Image: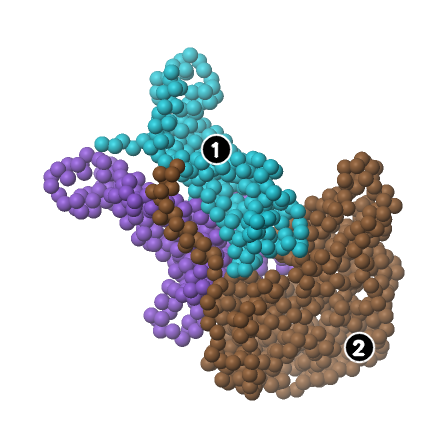
Chain colours: A brown, B cyan, C purple
Amino acid sequence: MENIVKKYRWPLYITAAILLGAVLSGCGRVLPAIDYTEPGQPAYGDTIIAGSISDATTFIPIVASDSASHNICGLVYNGLITYDKDLNIVGELADSWSIEEEGRVIVFNLHKNVKWHDGAPFTAEDVKFTYEKLIDPDVRTPYGGDFLKIESLEVMDPYTVKVVYGQPFSPALSSWGMWIMPRHILENEDLNKTKYGRSPIGTGPYKFVQWKSGQRIDLVANDEYFKGRPYINRYIYKIIPDTATMFLELQAQALDTMGLTPLQYRRQTSDDFFKAYYNKFRYPSFGYAYLGYNLLDDKFKEKRVRQALNYAVNKEALIYGVLMGLGRVCTGPFVPESWAYNNQLKPAKYNPQKAKEMLAEAGWGDSDGDGLLDKDGDIFEFTILTNQGNDLRKRAAEIIQHQLGAIGIRVKIRIVEWSVFLTEFINKKRFEVILMGWGLSRDPDCYDIWHSSKTREGEFNFISYNNPQVDSLLGQGRRIFNQEERAGIYHRIQEILYDEQPYMFLWVADSLPIVHKRFKAVSPAPAGIGYNFTKWYVPEDQQKYKQ
Amino acid sequence: MRDRYKLYLLYSVLSKNRIVVFGGVLIGVLTLLALFAPLVAPFDPLDISIKDALLAPSRTHIFGTDHLGRDLFSRIIFGARISLSIGFVAVGVSVLIGLVVGSVAGYYGRRVDTVLMRLVDIMLCFPSFFLILAVVAMLESSIINIMVVIGITSWMGVARLIRAEILSLKEREFILASRAVGASDFRIIVRHLMPNAIAPVLVSAVLGVAAAVLLESSLSFLGLGVQPPTPSWGNILMEGKASLGVCWWLMFFPGVFILMTVLGYNLLGEGLREYFNPRKRI
Amino acid sequence: MLLGISIISFCVIHLAPGSPVDSVTTLNPKVSFEAREKLIAQYGLDKPLAIQYLSWLRRLATFDFGVSYSDGQRVINKIVARVPITFLINILSLFFILLIAIPIGITSAVREGSFYDRSMTIFVFIGFAMPGFWLALMFMSFFGITLGWLPVQGIISLGFDRLSLLGKILDIGKHLILPVIVSSFGSLAAMSRYMRNNMLEVLHKDYIQTARAKGLSENSVIYKHALKNAILPIITILGLSVPGLIGGSVIVESIFGIPGMGRLFYESVMGRDYPVIMAVLVIGALLTLLGNLLADISYSLADPRIRYER
């Protein structure tokens, strides 16, 4: 043996050195010559490069359902309304509007002098066209639901649209954040296949330039944007399918902005290099993560059992372990920033002892001393199902498994690929517990998730929740327009849901974007940081890409 | 007497071929570690301890800890169990299929042979990783599925080897003799032809284990292999990827273990190959 | 043969539970039940399997692979856009392998048993044993970040369109260095080992001894006589390594963000984009067939013995 080692030792040393050296990286980077902390004066120019994990699929706004396509559509198109930094509805293509007949009718007055990117004028006909396509059964749009409630849509004159709903529908105004499409370009196109899906024409602050599939999407500033030309000249959306590599690109300064993972935020972006070149932000995202019980399963039929499980999971530990503290506990199906959120509800404190007692009352005791809870001969075990591709959910499942194991429940974890997850498990209700998240729209209407009628295959009440009181509250919430009144209704809904625990509400995670320091006017608000993107600028002396 | 001579031959070849010994020792150690995992591992590989997350290697945790505070060394040892057993079973499956197909094709010849070899050719046309990826993504990624799928996509080499050997052995006297005595086809194939044809298959099997371990780690790395919290080298690497640059130990150690395993099996396979087909030296 | 390929491809896809409608109608509270049903009918997924296969086969004959489920583009267009890049990487890898493996193999054989031979052996074996993605990540973080020499992502830089032709070529080249190295690393080992063994066998043959006895220079012996004979099997092996390269491209392209066929395949598998999956499988198999065919042809061209046998 010694002979072998002796003979080969030099090559072995060298190889080992190379391997180790390759691993111990991350040292010796250059610090900037320019002082990026200077706010400077707004100036036109420069380019921003954003990173994305996935590629877009189409730029027909009503057909696209993935986040990458949405990001681009958000810059190329406008809706009738949008949200300002405090999450209030303000007009975008609509200058003003009036709500009449207790909410059944909305009349929008549109901005005049808005032009499409090809120069044609924007009119009410475009709005009508968008509506017609939304309810067209041949168009593959997932967003038709809200618009099917419209009884009629009339073009009163080129800049006025009157929308009549069958019944007062309070989420209506919010639904008109939907991006408006150009009639003169698309009216004879098959929206599912049109070539304009790859080269869109909109009214928005940026015009489309090119899309290299799988690589990048280029946009350029719209000089004639009706709200004023954006400062940043070009927007490049770089597609990098892997967060680790995306981060490497960020470190190489080939990327200006991306969404950080909690680990990257906490541990990898605090050194001098990052302090000098980048600003990172943190604000609550608009969505929550939850553990959903299949309420048709005997084990979870009793409210007491679900409440006990809620006591058995330490949510703070979960947030600490999974999100590294970058998130908050949530007590209901809304985010704390939303006006619908009930701030009075206090989350249950972690109490495994109480959990055990409650479970014992429900018949789950450890009758055979094996450390596992059982009842009538069956041990308390179930499988948590979650989808692949989400590291955070996976870790959360593992932690929950561990915590429930401590009180005698055997939990198995199963990670399934996304489409299979939906068809085979969610839609067919073949699951015991799922760990998922909802990304919420600004309007708190959650009828589709909680109403007892929404349990058909493919609909969102897949846990089969049925509570007539909640049903009627949901219906009311949709019909009332007064925000205070509505808030009261949703507060009540939240109270009931937290008590009944059809979901164990896990957390509201923080969004963690990082932006290169040279971009100014970036200021976090309840709506995030993107709401004023058109006002971001780079002072002339700090611009990097001269174009 | 014969056996002692064979042993002596083995010994003399081995002592000349230190590389093989090195490979053999390597995988021997790893296999032992895997077998005795519960005794060797200092911690429970599934034991989560959030406050100990992402610690660098130290005296308590010699390889450090992962995102959930689990001891990496223990996870790697238990991961050895999983990765190695997947390797063995996958190779077992592929050898089994290959033996059957190859011997049937070689023995019966003509039409059967043509059809079966066509099948082999068709299967060889597909980039195997594509096929594996597609199938594993379609079905659920349980450990059994992975073993079977890797097996099903790698039997072709074995089949060809066996077929070649059988073709050459088929017309030998001892086979003709057995047929004259009235032995059934099955008996001839299994008891007479196969044992003599085994040598190249053994080499192929050993190398196949290395390939299977690499394949499993690639699959797990892409997220389609072994599912957490069960540790496998590939999925430890996948989890480690997220902390590239900060926590080097999460990527380094599993990679090194994969390296050592594959290296060991490759060396062993090469050595066996030389043992069975020694090159004549002038 | 081709029929067999198409059948296997079709079977593989339809093994799966889960239909492509699901990734389109992501779990989005705004997707209604009616909308989903609409979508299923639209894709024709409610027709029986056999009919789906036959209609697919018919279109296959005209290279019409249908339309991708994810973004409505014609599948053939998507593939054609991506194939060149994968092709480029694979060909460069092949060249790289030849360039490096053959000399290593030859020199190892010539200096059999020496320090050089032994260290090359170790190096090559380790290379063979390394998981490709591990190597890729190590390289990326070392060369890309620490040293900052090479770009880490994609195949072109930002200002690509404004570069001269030479600049463009250099730019692509720079981006391809790491992927090509990673992609060929595994095969390098096998190839050089094979070359070495072949060379050794040939060197021990009688006619080499004859050549030496004739008084030819050592160089001439090695390069003119031994090499020509040893190299022939390499060509076949090269052809056989094509499917390996194509398959390996999945990982390399995913990690380096290269928009090639491998990554397309991975994405379409995840998104249950059946038309694309089937198309890539079929095309991958076709390319392999082509590779083998070329290998056979060049082998028969290079080896006069085969020719005369015909």
Q: What amino acid is labelled 1 in the image?
A: Val
> Image height check: is B52 above or below A478?
above
The structure residue drawn at horizontal position 54% and vertical position 46%, both measured from the top left corner, is: B233
The residue closer to the viewer here, B253 or A176, is B253
Residue A406: x and y in percent read 74, 46
Q: Amino acid at mark 2?
A: Val
Identified at 40% across, 75% down, the residue is C162
Q: Residues within 10 Å of mark 2 (few under 14, many from 20)?
A: many
**What residue sits right under mark 2 in the picture?**
A105
Chain to which mark 1 belongs:
B
The location of residue A57, given as percent across then percent down, is 57, 64
Residue B279 appears in the rendering: yes
Of all residues shown, which one is farthest toward the front?
B59
Residue under label 1, please give it. B95
Q: Where's the C terminus of chain B, which quadrant?
A: top left
Asked whether A479 or C189 is in front, the reply is: C189
Rendered-image quadrant of the N terminus of chain B: top left
Query: Of discs 2 and 1, which sits in the foreground?
Result: 1
Q: Residue at x 42, y 28 (%)?
A: B198
Residue closest to the eye, C272 or A155: C272
Quadrant position of residue B174? top left
Residue B84 located left or right of residue A14: right
Q: Residue C161's quadrant in the figure?
A: bottom left
CA gap between label 2 and label 1 equals 73 Å
